[in-house]
Amino acid sequence: MQLTKTLNSIIKNVTKGHFKWSSLQINLNTKAREHTDSNNDGPSVVISGGEHTGGEFYVRPTKESESA
């Protein structure tokens, strides 16, 4: 529970209180294929920590931002 409170506090500070969320996902040593999070309701915040090798994180522009 303390980890959740700490991460929620970090997100609130990083976004200066301008981001509302209803869930928090924590991954450790996760390998994932390229995919689209299609069931999200609104924007997402990603915070990455630790040692990373052999991969990358890519955010594809949304259709709304591509047409702007």
Image (cartoon, rainbow, N blue to C red):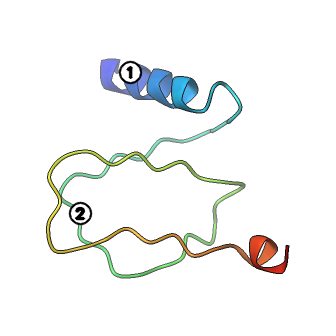
| Disc 2 + disc 1, Cβ < 8 Å | no
Can you tell which quarter of the image residue 31 is in?
Answer: bottom left
Residue at 67% from the left image edge and 36% from the top image edge: 19
Residue 13 or residue 2, whichever sits in front: 13
Residue 10 appears at what percent x and percent y? 45, 26
Can you tell which quarter of the image residue 7 is in?
Answer: top left
Residue 5 appears at what percent x and percent y? 42, 20
Q: What residue type is labelled 1?
A: Thr
Residue 34 or residue 49, whichever sits in front: 49
**Res 67 label:** none
- Quadrant of the image containing the N terminus: top left
Q: Residues within 10 Å of mark 2 (few under 14, many from 20)?
A: few
For label 2, the residue is: 30
27 sits left or right of 13 in the view: left
For label 1, the residue is: 6
Q: What residue type is labelled 2?
A: Thr
Vertical relation: 59 (above or below) 66: above
Vertical relation: 39 (above or below) 17: below
Q: Is mark 1 on a helix, strand or loop?
A: helix
